[in-house]
Image (tube, rainbow, N blue to C red):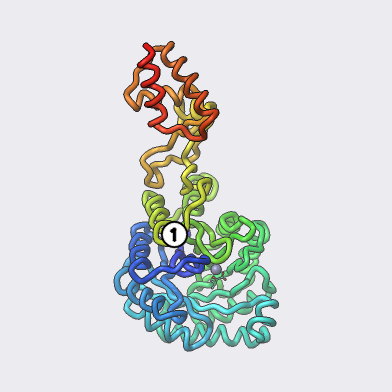
Amino acid sequence: MSVKIFDTTLRDGEQTPGVSLNVKEKLEIAKQLDRLKVDVIEAGFPVTSEGDFKAVKKIAEEVSNPTVAGLARANKKDIDRAWEALKAAKKPRIHTFIATSPVHMEHKLKQSPEEVLESAVEAVKYAKSYTDDVEFSAEDASRSDKDFLCDIFEATIDAGATTINIPDTVGYATPQEYGALIKYIKDNVPNIDQAVISVHCHNDLGMATANSLAAVENGAEQVECAVNGLGERAGNTSLEEVALSLDTRFDYYDIKTDINLKEISRSSRLVSHLTGVQVQPNKAIVGENAFAHESGIHQDGVIKERTTYEIMDAQTIGLKENKMVLGKLSGRHAFKQRLEELGYDLTQDELNSAFKRFKDLADRKKKITNLDLEAIMEDEISQV
Ligand code: KIV
Ligand code: ZN
């Protein structure tokens, strides 16, 4: 089995507070997403600004392998604008949405469930008059009534939706609960076989990746995510976490993606550079420390056999190698290896004495660099 990866770095990802990308930057990221081999690029929300409209249009014109999607609320004006931007795409998709939870319908939309269902059906039919590929999202699905969700999905699939998306818009769901919701929809929407089931999770409680994977185990066929987990508030499901979880634990999930894993690290760096959002050092997969070892016991283990403390190979995501960080917890083995890389071949006594100096320095200084090691060695040599 396989799942499609729908990347929303350029739409929900751009909703990260403080992030604004111009047309050139969005195109550059879209070209990298193409190299990463995502199935769908959600390029933007064309009605929101002239700049976003131009960016979606440019991406639609220039990026032809993935499907290019544009977001639109469930009204004609948004859908017209989305189509205007998307129409040059080789594979265009209109993604239309409306909220289905009681709190959103009552306070935000001020519409009854019947009115919401009618707007959704009208929107899908209208989008369908432009293109065959129409995605419908029930915003705040995880806080919506399950049977109302089934009704709205059945009706929108009848109206022509080819993908139905079940967002955990506010990151409220837990993995078991969200997995069960996906299964419920799969089991209770009679025409579900005519559409792809998609999931879209936010990370407010730090569970976006776990929720997306639980959904996949329960029948989701498309995962919406963003590079570096960017997105509104605490962000969206992180693309790299989903791709590497499915790859590393293929023995468990038995599910493939088409993602070109070697492009993961480059994609992360490009998105971080152009958005100005730094990746936290301990971020899974793409954080600076994700393939770094500091303690002596771990370093010794990895030098003897990499898989003692690594479940993934740094090269899988396009990095050159893992890293041994020298600090006060590091051991003799990694210290010796680093000195050898720097060209020092030491006797046992020389090593013992240099190692003692290194430990003294490491007690005072958090990170020991190659320059520090060279200084230690110059001192050693001058004392001979
Ligand atoms: O989080 C959400 O519900 C969304 C929809 C527009 C898909 O981003
Ligand atoms: Zn979202």
Percent of width and height locating residue 60: 34, 74
* Towards the viewer: 281 or 81: 281
Q: Position of residue 377 (x, y in %)?
A: 38, 21
Up the image or down, 245 lies above or below 324; here it is below
Q: In the rendered image, is residue 218 in sight?
A: no
Q: Residue at x 52, y 76 (%)?
A: 136
Residue at (66%, 62%) from the top-left corner? 173
Dot 1: what SS? loop
Left or right position of 61 against 193:
left
Q: How many marks?
A: 1
Q: Which residue is mark 1?
A: 276
Residue 125 on image: x %, y %: 49, 86
Depth check, front residue: 371 or 286: 371
Give left or right: position of 275 versus 342. Answer: right
Percent position of residue 23, x then y: 35, 71
Q: Which of the four quarters of the rendered structure image does ligand 1 lie in?
A: bottom right
